[in-house]
Amino acid sequence: MATVSFSKTPALAATNGAAMAAVLGAGIGSCAMGAFVLLNEAGLFAAPTLYGPAGGVTGRTTFATIVWLVAWSVLHARWKSRDVAPGPVFTWTVVLLVLAILGTFPPLWGLL
Amino acid sequence: MLFSERSIWTMVHGIGLGGGALLGLAAALFYLYAARPATLSTETHTGSRAFATVTVFSAVMLWLAVIIGTYIIFPPYRVAPPPGTIDLSEFPRSLILANPNTVWLHAFAMETKEHLPWVASMLTTAVAFIAVRYRPTALSNPAMRRMAFTLLAVSFAMVAWVSLLGVFVNKVAPLD
C-alpha cells in the first residue's frame, strides 16, 4: 500500500530544533525581564530610560526584548537543523518562567 | 465629546487588544485540547492552519497591547501634578497614591502590569512561531503540543490577571 504524506514542508518538520530554540528563547527572555526588574529594584542596575514620559519601564522592557531576540537567534542558528531533546528544554523553560514571575512580583521586591 | 482621546486609547488597549488576545489564546488552547494527536490527516492539517492563524493573531494583539500600553497609556497615567494641585482626577497615579486604601493599585497592580504582559508576549510569539513553521505537525507532535499548551496556558493566565488588575486601576483612577 502506498504511503501518502500530507506534510508540505517535510524538511522543516524533520527536526524540532527550531521549535526548541523558540521555547527556550522565550524562557530566557522572560527570565531577563524578571532579572532587569529585580536589579532595578535592588538598585544594582537601572536600564536607561528610552522614552522619558514612560520612565524606566521602557529601558527594562526593551533590554529584556533584546535579550530574548538575541537568545532566540543564537539558539535557532545552532539548533535549527538538529533534533533537540524536548524534556530538558521544557524543564529549563519552566524554571526560567518561574524566575521571571518571581522577579516581576512586586511583593518580593520588599525583601531585597 | 463622549470619550476623550486618552479614554479611547485605554479602551483600544484593554478591550480591543487585551480582549482580542484573550479570545485568541482561549481559541488556541481549545484547538490544542480538542485536536486529535498522533494523526496526520487532512482534518488535522486544517486544524493546524487555524491554530497557526489564531496564535499569530494572539501574538500580534499582545505586542500591540504592550507597546501601546507602555508608550501611550502609561505616560498620562504617571504624569506628576503641578505643585499645589488639589483635584487629582487628571493624574491617576497621584490619585491612587493619595489614598492609603488604593496605594496597592499602583504598588502591586500597575507595577505588575508594567512587566508581566511582555513575558506573555514572548511566550505567545514562541508558540506562534512553532505553529507556523511546523504547521503540518504542530498539533500531532506530543512534545510540541505539551509545550505549546503550557506556554499558552501561562500566557492566558498572565493576560487575564493583568487585565483584571487593569480593570481595578481604571475603575478607581480612569484615564478620562
Image (cartoon, coloured by chain):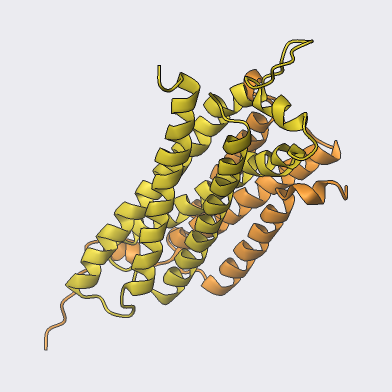
Chain colours: A orange, B yellow
Task: Tell me residue B65's x, y (percent).
Answer: 48, 38
Q: Nearer the viewer, residue B3 or A56?
A: B3
Q: State the residue lying farthest toward the left.
A: A1
Q: Quadrant of residue B32?
A: bottom left
Q: State the residue lying farthest toward the bottom.
A: A1
Q: Quadrant of residue A15?
A: bottom left
Where is A88 relative to B134, above or below?
below
**On the rendered image, what quadrant is the N terminus of chain A found in?**
bottom left
Q: Is residue B141 visible?
A: yes
Where is A65 relative to B30, above or below?
above
B165 sits left or right of A41 in the view:
left
State the residue at coordinates (40%, 39%). B16
Q: Is residue A78 visible?
A: no
Task: Tell me residue B95's x, y (percent).
Answer: 71, 27
Where is B133 relative to A58, above or below?
below
B164 sits left or right of A60 in the view:
left
Task: Tell me residue B84's x, y (percent).
Answer: 79, 10
Q: State the residue lying farthest toward the right.
A: A112
Q: Nearer the viewer, residue B30 or B142?
A: B30
State the residue at coordinates (64%, 22%). B89
Q: Quadrant of residue B44?
A: bottom left
State the residue at coordinates (63%, 38%). B114
Where is B12 relative to A54, above or below?
below
Task: Tell me residue A14's x, y (percent).
Answer: 35, 68
Q: Nearer the viewer, residue A35 or B99?
A: B99
B129 sits left or right of B147 in the view:
left
